[in-house]
Image: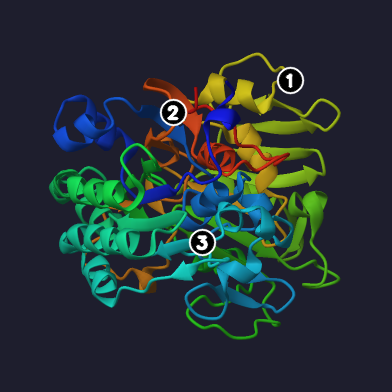
């Protein structure tokens, strides 16, 4: 019997999102037997050891991928903020923009929320077609880094399951603050994981009562990891040093007079925007202009200029509709896409390989690229970077921070100390995990997947027909 045949449209789905939890830390603790309750519950479920998340490695990108099966550039979710060329100002989802409105219109009726119908969300970012539970006490715990957040979220989620029995329950328990201030694998982060393991049986008991044992599907995962940081690169300040007039990031105002803008997301990915030298913000400068931009009386190669900065590891820009330039300090490469075969190729064109793949250039499918790179330092880059530039909100240039660096503006670091950040391409940020269990689910370990593959399994449970996406069904028998 097929997976669709086994799965019923009445199967409720529970999605538990552990925000910003390092995948390697969880993997270590789980495999060493330090999480006995999770180990017992998922003993006949699925453990995905390396789930590659969406770039940029920020919550907005991951959530967009999970609910739709598409990458960040296609969902239009590149982070919590971007620069609008149309309005000439920074757009921020906490203040003057809404993620639900920016989320790709053509995908809104194809999300797992739309499929489920009756769904409840807590701590989510993209508000589309579901009931939202706002827990003020949990919000306080999250902002102060209190581990009381874990028991509070479990308590409220259990209550919601018992009272409302939603077809989709999707909630977050955030390790974001404690990861930032304690380091990606710090003692408090370990305590967070142990606390979740301790409280998990309460959630399982409530779900069993609400839906019946073995009658629901549950996913536990982290949206992204993080990287240790100690140095800051102020991107707007850097543009000003170059001779540009960058838009300010400390005010949300009209920036028509600016000729550039630079924003970070997750603190380790950067979006950089440039006005056209002759036509201003109404037109993008294009690749040739970026490699020869008129500045202070000469033509400057902006990509090389940024790549040479100590705090930058990679610079990306769209060459044309079918290729992306990859620039580092020591070399350049090109990501190419062939729409006829739906395959990608990456090749080095100058100096050393910026991605360190050390592979002969050849055309490969999305699945082949995932298999080939999921254990590399920069996993899944050719596929994800190409698709990122499909977003109308994407910068003309995309940056990933160098090891130990972030791009956060010095005035806006709301932590007593910042020891870890995310958003970049490193495997510490891109690699997470998935625990899953439900009707018709496999039992055992799957070495790798994409985080957005969760979408494919949920869509199968809801008997969604002809739903095309990048997600692959890997978890059902």
Look at 68% across and 51% down and name the residue there.
74
Q: Are marks 2 and 3 in contact (CB under 8 Å)?
A: no
Secondary structure of residue under mark 2: loop
Q: Residue furthest top?
A: 360
Mark carried by residue 363 = 1
From the image, tell me which residue sits under label 2.
Answer: 441
Look at 77% across and 52% down and name the residue there.
292
Mark 2 against mark 1, which lies toward the viewer? 2
From the image, tell me which residue sits under label 3.
Answer: 118
* Cα gap from disc 1 to disc 3, whole angstroms: 42 Å
In this view, 336 is above or below 9: above
Q: Nearer the viewer, residue 228 or 76?
A: 76
Say if residue 394 shows up in the picture. Answer: no
Q: Which comes before the other along the chain, label 2 or label 1? A: 1
Figure quadrant of the N terminus: top right
Look at 59% across and 86% down and name the residue there.
253
Numbered disc total: 3
Q: Which comes before the other along the chain, label 1 or label 3? A: 3
Image location of residue 344, percent across then percent down = 72, 28
Image quadrant where residue 260 sits: bottom right
* Cα gap from disc 2 to disc 3, whole angstroms: 23 Å
Q: Nearer the viewer, residue 454 or 309?
A: 454
Image location of residue 67, percent across then percent down = 55, 51
């Amino acid at each position: 019997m097929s997976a669709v045949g086994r799965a019923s449209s009445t199967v409720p789905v529970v999605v538990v999102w552990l925000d910003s939890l390092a995948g390697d830390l969880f993997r270590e603790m789980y495999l060493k037997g330090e999480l006995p309750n999770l180990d017992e519950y998922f003993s006949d479920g699925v453990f995905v050891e390396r789930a590659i998340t969406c770039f940029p490695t920020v919550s907005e990108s991951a959530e967009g991928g999970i609910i739709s099966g598409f990458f960040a550039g296609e969902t239009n979710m590149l982070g919590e903020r971007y620069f609008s060329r149309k309005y000439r100002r920074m757009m921020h989802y906490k203040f003057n923009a809404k993620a639900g409105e920016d989320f790709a219109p053509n995908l809104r009726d194809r999300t797992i929320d739309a499929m489920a119908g009756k769904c409840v969300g807590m701590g989510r970012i993209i508000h589309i077609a579901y009931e939202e539970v706002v827990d003020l006490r949990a919000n306080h715990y999250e902002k102060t880094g209190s581990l009381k957040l874990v028991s509070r979220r479990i308590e409220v989620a259990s209550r919601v399951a018992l009272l409302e029995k939603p077809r989709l329950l999707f909630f977050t328990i955030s390790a974001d603050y404690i990861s930032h201030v304690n380091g990606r694998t710090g003692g408090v982060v370990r305590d967070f994981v142990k606390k979740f393991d301790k409280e998990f049986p309460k959630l399982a008991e409530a779900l069993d009562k609400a839906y019946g044992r073995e009658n629901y599907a549950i996913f536990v995962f982290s949206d992204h990891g993080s990287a240790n940081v100690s140095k800051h690169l102020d991107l707007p300040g850097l543009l000003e040093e170059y001779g540009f007039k960058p838009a300010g990031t400390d005010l949300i105002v009209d920036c028509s007079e600016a000729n550039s803008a630079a924003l970070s997301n997750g603190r380790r990915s950067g979006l950089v925007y440039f006005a056209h030298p002759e036509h201003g913000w109404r037109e993008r400068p294009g690749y040739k202009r970026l490699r020869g931009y008129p500045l202070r009386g000469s033509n400057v190669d902006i990509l090389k200029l940024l790549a040479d900065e100590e705090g930058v590891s990679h610079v990306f820009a769209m060459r044309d509709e079918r290729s992306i330039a990859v620039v580092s300090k020591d070399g350049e490469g090109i990501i190419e896409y062939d729409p006829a075969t739906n395959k990608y190729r990456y090749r080095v064109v100058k100096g050393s390989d910026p991605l360190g793949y050390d592979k002969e250039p050849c055309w490969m499918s999305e699945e082949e690229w995932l298999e080939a790179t999921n254990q590399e330092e920069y996993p899944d880059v050719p596929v994800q970077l190409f698709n990122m530039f499909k977003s109308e909100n994407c910068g003309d240039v995309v940056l990933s921070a160098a090891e130990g660096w972030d791009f956060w503006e010095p005035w806006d670091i709301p932590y007593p100390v910042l020891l870890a950040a995310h958003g970049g391409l490193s495997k510490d940020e891109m690699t997470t995990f998935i625990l899953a269990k439900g009707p018709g689910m496999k039992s055992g370990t799957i070495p790798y997947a994409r985080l957005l593959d969760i979408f494919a399994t949920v869509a199968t449970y809801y008997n969604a027909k002809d739903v095309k996406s990048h997600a692959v069904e890997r978890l059902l028998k």
